[in-house]
Image (spheres, helix red, strand yellow):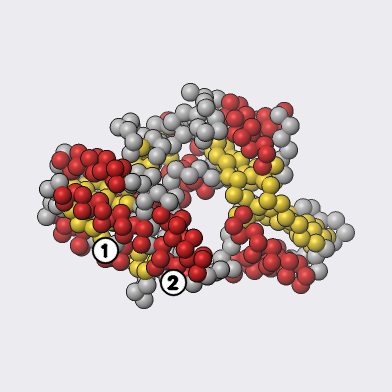
Amino acid sequence: MALVVQKYGGTSVGTTDRMKNVAKRIIKTYDAGNDLIVVVSAMSGETNKLVALANEMSEIPDGREYDVVVATGEQVTTGLLSMYLKSLGYKAKSYQGWQVPIITDGTATKARIESIDDARIRADLKAGTIVIVAGFQGIDSEGNITTLGRGGSDTSAVAIAAALKADVCEIYTDVDGVYTTDPNVCKEARKMEKVSYDEMLELASLGAKVLQIRSVEFAKKYNVDIHVRSSLNENTGTMVTREDKEMEGILVSGVAYDKNEAKIAVMGVPDKPGIAAKILTALSDANISVDMIVQNVGHDSMTDFTFTVTKADLKQSLLITNEVAREIQAKQVVSDENISKVSIVGLGMRSHAGVATKMFSALASNGINIQMISTSEIKISVIIDEKYTELAVRVLHETFGMQC
């Protein structure tokens, strides 16, 4: 007998018929003699509806009340799924995040899990109950309902698996694993049997939407194996796990892209210590994350400072950056939304030279200009014109031999 945590995303529970199909899978796992915890998202589209309602009531919704509203989507799913399992004669019990409780910090809309009290869940499992937990939500030390950010149900599932030392955490989505790149962009994309935590962290942070990045961070920290599978078929998916020598032999494992990037350039910045920190501190104080950063070589005591943020943060970032630019007497601030980030990821980069040269040459031969570059031990990312995104993905996928 194993302890299994299963997570079902919004598409998997998007209708009552799909919930009934999910119930069949749950029952099959339970009848095989396993203890079972199921973490669910809101039904497909429900969170978007709730967000829209919040925005109708306030241009900038209060964070606390926003969390109260958007957390209700998962509450509906837990109740309906538990109700159906009970109607079939199975013991089931639903929990909201605050009932477990899943304790988070107090950051509205982007809370981080601090601890999980597993006593209630363990008692239910011992009694043979299938436990259904609302993903995406928790409660802070002041008793406020909190949410973990979009995609947070993945994090809930992995955190629960870690807290209860589950044997495996199965993440069910509308895709049947992690692919070398987006199959909608490159028809030669292939499903990977396994991928390391570090590679998945990079892929998730670079635009791959299969897993939420914080869920992978939890999995790596607590050695939780994640099996990414489709709820629409019985196919074996992709195992996200500890790296091994076989993984290290693959030069590039995947190509990711992200069109949700915008570039801001501060032109004519005084080339002296502390200027970059002044710009970035103002942004971080507003809870805005900066991704790629480039500072040109200074000339005549002046330089240019360029960075990227998400498109959603661009408007606020420009307001802040323009204000700082006036303070430091920079010449001008310009922005560009028509960019995207394309990246290659692979453990094999650690021990192979010439990967960047191969990447840049492939892009250049296809007329794709590189605007910015960022690297890590197992990743190379470039900013390019958005209109070349799909071409770049296909070119790099072929260049590094990732076809089926």
Q: Nearer the viewer, mark 2 or mark 1?
A: 2
Q: Position of residue 76 (x, y in %)?
A: 31, 57
Q: Position of residue 258 (x, y in %)?
A: 58, 45
Q: Which residue is mark 2?
A: 64
Q: How many marks?
A: 2
- Residue 213: tell me if it is visible: yes
Seen from the viewer's position, the closer of residues 371 and 31 is 31
Q: Earlier in the sequence, mark 2 or mark 1?
A: 2
Q: Is residue 302 left or right of residue 252?
A: right
Q: For the residue labelled by badge 2, is the local secondary structure a helix, a strand or a loop?
A: helix
Q: Which residue is mark 1?
A: 100
Question: CB under 8 Å between callouts 2 and 1?
Answer: no
Q: Amino acid at mark 1?
A: Val
Residue that appears at 45% across and 67% down: 66
- Marks 2 and 1, how far apart at CA: 20 Å
Q: Position of residue 255 (x, y in %)?
A: 55, 36
